Amino acid sequence: MKHAINQSYEKYTARKRIIVLIVILLIIVFSIFSICAGSSNIKPYQVIMTVLGNGDGISDVVIWNIRLPRVLAAIIAGAGLSVSGCVMQSNLRNPLASPSTLGISSAAAFGANLAIIVFGAGSIKSSSADAVLINNPYIVTICAFCFSMMATFIILMIAKLKALSSEAVLLAGVAIGSLFSAGITLIQYFAQDVQVAAVVFWTFGDLGRASWREVIIMMVLIIISIVYFVVRQWDYNAIDSGEETAKSLGVNVERIRFGGLFVASLITAAAVSFLGIIGFIGLIGPQVMRRVIGGDHRFLILGSALMGSLLLLISDTFARTIISPIVLPVGAITSFLGAPMFLYLLMRGDKRK
């Protein structure tokens, strides 16, 4: 009997590990394809040789300075946004929880609007006709990050002081998001056309903005965050069974929820402030993996991060190649791909019930 149970458990975990490995292989394949895709005729073997340090001059410049940082930004930001959504959904026990619904993205957009319009960080680039340029991206990034974290602290403080339920926390996030959206409208109403154009350009979301510095900062934050989430994986599993059950097992639900939401908001704020608003990834990535490998956080946390990386990488590659040389906004692509997929998953879930 015991042997049969062990075999069943090993089969249960082996299937989940195989799925995770498949997603990793897909990320590697699409990464090479994404680096090769573009106006420069780069072959897969050139990518491999360049990464190994044996590339020629042209491929070195194109791969190391342009395409590899963009691909890594997609992988890292996708992982961060998706794992943030996973933890938010688990802590609040609500499948609709995400950086967008908690108001973090709206707060970051307000900070960017403030920097571009009030502090003059947006202008017209004189080298090409009517090209919008963010002439001080660091002010934009700092303002976006500060206001996104401000929204996080407001929501968490309200939740802690008033002991709100998970549903009330989500509604508080929606209210905060609406407040910042109203602020964005007022700022834009008094802005010049060029400044509004610069704001719209920022909100599109663009992985091409990320240099090696931004990639490294996001990578460090997200790796530390994922380690933190993995350490707390059993607590999240307990919370999924219900607050009373988790408390009976010795889990400090309020502290775990506060810490998880704070860390998830931190990495979301970093990604949004560096790259602009990229919707859908934090909402749909965890939902896809939850249906594929289940709700066990030992696999769901890593699986959600990998699925987010794959989704954003595919979306960015599609945005760059569909009508090349024009590069479409990756935020628009993720929304177009995500909305039908999310509706499909909802309908599929209803059928299961």
Image (cartoon, rainbow, N blue to C red):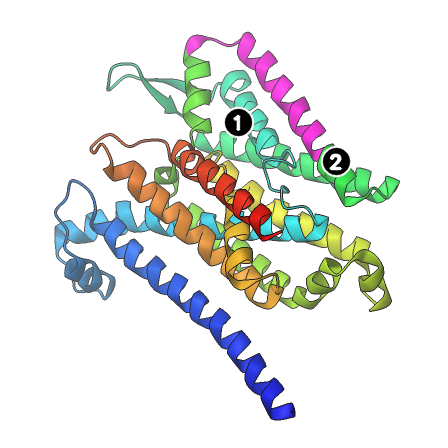
The amino acid beneath tag 1 is Ala
Residue at 30% x, 41% y: name it: 318
Q: Is residue 54 above or below residue 114?
A: below
The amino acid beneath tag 2 is Ile
Q: Is residue 100 toward the left or the right of residue 337 in the image?
A: right
- Looking at the picture, how far across and down is residue 85, in whole percent? 58, 48
How many numbered marks does the figure carry?
A: 2
Q: Which residues are magenta?
A: 173-193
Residue at numbered disc 1 = 112
SS class of the residue under badge 2? Answer: helix
- Front-most of 327 and 284? 284
- Looking at the picture, how far across and down is residue 215, in whole percent? 42, 49
Contact (Cβ within 8 Å) of mark 2 with mark 1: no
The crowding category of the residue bearing disc 1, from other C-alpha atoms within 10 Å (few below 14, some 14 to 19, many at least 20), is: many
What type of secondary structure mainly makes up the magenta span?
Answer: helix
Identify the mark at residue 154; answer none if there is no mark.
2
Q: Is residue 182 above or below residue 255?
A: above
Residue at 21% x, 63% y: name it: 48
Q: Decide if residue 152 is in sight here.
A: yes
Residue at 32% x, 60% y: name it: 28
